[in-house]
Amino acid sequence: MASVADHYHETTTRQAEQILGFLRTFEALQEQIHLAKIPQHQAELVEQVGDLFTDLNAQNEGLEVPPERAAFHKTWLEALEQLEDAYTSFRTGSAHNFIVAYMQSRRAFSLGKYLLYGLRAELPPIQPYWFLPDDFSRRTELETSAPDNTAQTGMMHRKQTNKHAEYSLYVPENYDPTKRWPLVITLHGGHGRGDDYLLTWLRTAKSRGFILLSPKSLGQTWSIQQPGLDVRSILSMLETVMDEYTVNTNRILVSGLSDGGTFSYALGISCSKLFAGIAPIAGVLPPWLDYKQATALPIFIVHGAKDFIFPVSSARMAREFLEGQDFAHVSYTELPDWGHAYTYSINETLVLPWFEQLPDRLHAAD
């Protein structure tokens, strides 16, 4: 007869396998969502997920928990509750208030993932989710702290000060202060959050050795018409991070989604000598920036042909304008089936390779 500990382990392992499927299903939905297809998305989600959380709750209600697993179990239940909230908010949101329901859903999904990330060593079935597929075999190496490192690694969330807004930071667990680490600034969309958008870059940063700085805008969205406000905030954050960690100052990169893509232009053009390259995704090029001093800045524009917020024509015009301003390094990718949604696979399969092939910033000798 199986012991209490064995039964508990078997149960949570089986549940973790099911949750891995949910994570991948819900993430894929976030990437492909289209406002004109909400009922279809909801129906497809229910078809794939069904009564998963009802079943898990029933299993856990009568589950005997070994004393040594009490702390784990408490956090596990909290994570399941957040993921269930994400599922419920999405599938029950009505057409007239769906944006509110979606934002609630996305927030709960993020909170659930942060809880799961803290349990990752105890949930082997979910571990592949945190790595790029080709790098999962290196997981022990990537999770092992450098012998002489005393700096904090992993996820950090820092409060607003009189110099900057709140921001989130990810430092790879194998951070070694004797090496110089590239850093990516990731900019959320309108009404978004830095701690939420950071998660779209987590697998990439963890697998390929990037520090992530994910700021929150000072307002509900970025100060695009007065870029100096959020530029100063971000530079203050960056200065703090560079004081604490060994950042490769020739490999600081920027990417953002939607309004964050638009502000990627603003930040990159305003401080062009600071960055090795920028990758605006589903953004709009602000016409009032001083472009002449930034023509050496590499720019990678990514946009969906089915974008229902910022039509793809705006991205095509941005490319033509930049090339007309003598920008020497403008790359452009138009995704024929993509609209305006989250960017997990875009970051991993498009932006990451582009970042990795860039030389150190072109102004390094200045």
Image (cartoon, rainbow, N blue to C red):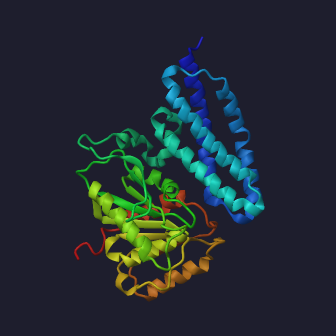
Vertical order, 21 against 262 (above or below): above
Pick whichever, 338 or 340, lies toward us.
340
Q: Residue furthest bottom?
A: 324
Vertical order, 253 against 225 (above or below): above
- Point out the image quarter for the N terminus: top right
Q: Position of residue 232 (x, y in %)?
A: 38, 71
Quarter of the image where one finds residue 336? bottom right
Question: Is 196 on the left or on the right of 61, as rendered?
Answer: left
Pick whichever, 239 or 187, lies toward us.
239
Q: Position of residue 101 (x, y in %)?
A: 69, 56
Q: Residue furthest front?
A: 162
Question: Is 261 on the left or on the right of 233, as rendered?
Answer: right
Vertical order, 155 against 17 (above or below): below
Question: Is 44 on the left or on the right of 18, as rendered?
Answer: right
Vertical order, 283 against 242 (above or below): below
Q: Image point 72% across, 56% down: which residue?
A: 41
Q: Image point 68% across, 38% down: which residue?
A: 53
Answer whether residue 28 is visible to the viewer in this image: no
Q: Position of residue 263 (x, y in %)?
A: 48, 73
Answer whether residue 83 is visible to the viewer in this image: yes
Q: Residue furthest top?
A: 1
Q: How many marks?
A: 0
Q: Position of residue 304 (x, y in %)?
A: 60, 70
- Point out the image quarter for the C terminus: bottom left
Q: Image point 46% across, 47% down: which residue?
A: 131
